[in-house]
Image: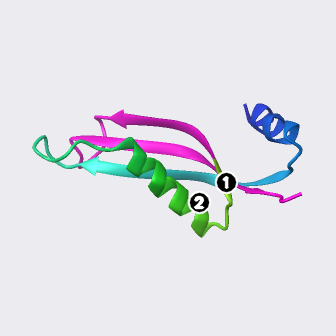
Amino acid sequence: YRRQRQMCIRDRGKPFRDLGEVTGTVCQATEQDSPPNLATARKRMQIKASTMKANAVLLHQCQVVTDAQGCYQQAVCKGSALNVSKQ
Protein backbone atom coordinates (compact mmCIF):
# COMPACT_ATOMS: atom_id res chain seq x y z
CA TYR A 1 0.00 0.00 0.00
CA ARG A 2 2.74 2.47 0.93
CA ARG A 3 4.72 1.56 -2.19
CA GLN A 4 1.69 2.23 -4.42
CA ARG A 5 1.24 5.74 -2.98
CA GLN A 6 4.89 6.61 -3.56
CA MET A 7 4.91 5.22 -7.06
CA CYS A 8 1.79 7.17 -7.96
CA ILE A 9 3.36 10.46 -6.91
CA ARG A 10 6.78 9.63 -8.35
CA ASP A 11 5.13 8.78 -11.65
CA ARG A 12 4.24 12.45 -11.86
CA GLY A 13 7.92 13.28 -11.48
CA LYS A 14 7.70 14.93 -8.07
CA PRO A 15 9.58 13.44 -5.11
CA PHE A 16 7.92 13.82 -1.72
CA ARG A 17 8.38 13.19 1.97
CA ASP A 18 5.66 11.55 4.08
CA LEU A 19 5.29 13.60 7.28
CA GLY A 20 2.83 11.24 8.97
CA GLU A 21 -0.85 10.49 9.27
CA VAL A 22 -3.39 13.26 9.86
CA THR A 23 -7.03 13.04 10.91
CA GLY A 24 -9.90 15.51 10.80
CA THR A 25 -13.16 14.96 12.66
CA VAL A 26 -16.60 16.53 13.10
CA CYS A 27 -18.88 15.36 15.91
CA GLN A 28 -22.68 15.32 15.96
CA ALA A 29 -23.22 15.26 19.72
CA THR A 30 -26.95 14.42 19.74
CA GLU A 31 -29.52 13.20 17.28
CA GLN A 32 -31.03 16.72 17.19
CA ASP A 33 -27.73 18.38 16.13
CA SER A 34 -26.70 18.97 12.52
CA PRO A 35 -25.28 15.84 10.90
CA PRO A 36 -21.49 15.66 10.61
CA ASN A 37 -20.06 17.04 7.39
CA LEU A 38 -17.34 15.15 5.49
CA ALA A 39 -16.13 18.31 3.74
CA THR A 40 -15.52 19.96 7.12
CA ALA A 41 -13.68 16.87 8.40
CA ARG A 42 -11.51 16.91 5.25
CA LYS A 43 -10.75 20.62 5.72
CA ARG A 44 -9.75 20.04 9.37
CA MET A 45 -7.45 17.24 8.22
CA GLN A 46 -5.82 19.63 5.73
CA ILE A 47 -5.36 22.28 8.41
CA LYS A 48 -3.63 19.75 10.68
CA ALA A 49 -1.35 18.79 7.80
CA SER A 50 -0.43 22.43 7.22
CA THR A 51 0.66 22.75 10.86
CA MET A 52 3.14 19.96 10.06
CA LYS A 53 4.52 22.06 7.17
CA ALA A 54 2.85 19.80 4.60
CA ASN A 55 1.99 21.20 1.19
CA ALA A 56 -0.20 18.25 0.13
CA VAL A 57 -2.42 15.60 1.67
CA LEU A 58 -3.01 12.12 0.30
CA LEU A 59 -6.55 11.20 1.35
CA HIS A 60 -6.89 7.64 2.61
CA GLN A 61 -10.53 7.57 3.67
CA CYS A 62 -13.51 9.66 4.77
CA GLN A 63 -16.51 8.12 6.47
CA VAL A 64 -19.30 8.74 8.98
CA VAL A 65 -19.13 6.45 12.00
CA THR A 66 -21.63 5.84 14.78
CA ASP A 67 -19.35 4.27 17.39
CA ALA A 68 -17.33 7.37 18.35
CA GLN A 69 -17.28 8.08 22.07
CA GLY A 70 -19.29 11.19 22.98
CA CYS A 71 -20.83 11.57 19.49
CA TYR A 72 -24.13 10.43 18.04
CA GLN A 73 -22.30 10.33 14.69
CA GLN A 74 -18.85 11.47 13.66
CA ALA A 75 -17.33 12.33 10.27
CA VAL A 76 -13.71 11.17 10.11
CA CYS A 77 -11.14 11.78 7.37
CA LYS A 78 -7.68 10.21 7.45
CA GLY A 79 -4.74 10.84 5.20
CA SER A 80 -0.99 11.32 4.92
CA ALA A 81 0.59 14.75 5.25
CA LEU A 82 3.13 15.18 2.45
CA ASN A 83 5.84 17.63 1.57
CA VAL A 84 6.03 17.46 -2.22
CA SER A 85 9.16 18.86 -3.84
CA LYS A 86 8.60 21.78 -6.22
CA GLN A 87 10.93 20.32 -8.89
Left or right of 68, for residue 43:
right
- Asked whether the beta carbons under mark 1 and mark 2 sit within 8 Å of each other, the answer is yes
Residue 49 marker: 2
Quarter of the figure that contains the C terminus: bottom right
Residue 67, x across and y down, in percent: 30, 36
The total of numbered circles placed on residues is 2
User: Which residues, given as a range, are shown in magenta?
Assistant: 58-87
Q: Crowdedness of circle 1 by 10 Å Cα count: few (<14), some, many (20+)?
A: some
Residue 12, x across and y down, in percent: 84, 40
Amino acid at pointer 1: Ala
The answer to which quarter of the image holds residue 44 is bottom left
* Residue at image point 58% right, 45% down: 79
Q: How much space separates mark 1 and mark 2, taking CA atoms? A: 8 Å
The answer to which quarter of the image holds residue 35 is top left
Residue 56 marker: 1
Residue sitting nearer the eye, 34 or 60: 34
* Residue at image point 67% right, 67% down: 53
As for residue 79 lying within the magenta part, the answer is: yes
The answer to which quarter of the image holds residue 4 is top right
As for residue 42 lying within the magenta part, the answer is: no
Amino acid at pointer 2: Ala
Residue 5, above or below 82: above
Q: How is the image coloured?
A: rainbow
Left or right of 10, for residue 20:
left
Residue sitting nearer the eye, 74 or 67: 74
Residue 7, x across and y down, in percent: 84, 35
Q: Crowdedness of circle 2 by 10 Å Cα count: few (<14), some, many (20+)?
A: many
Quarter of the figure that contains the N terminus: top right
Secondary structure predominantly adopted by residues drawn in magenta: strand
Element at badge 1? strand
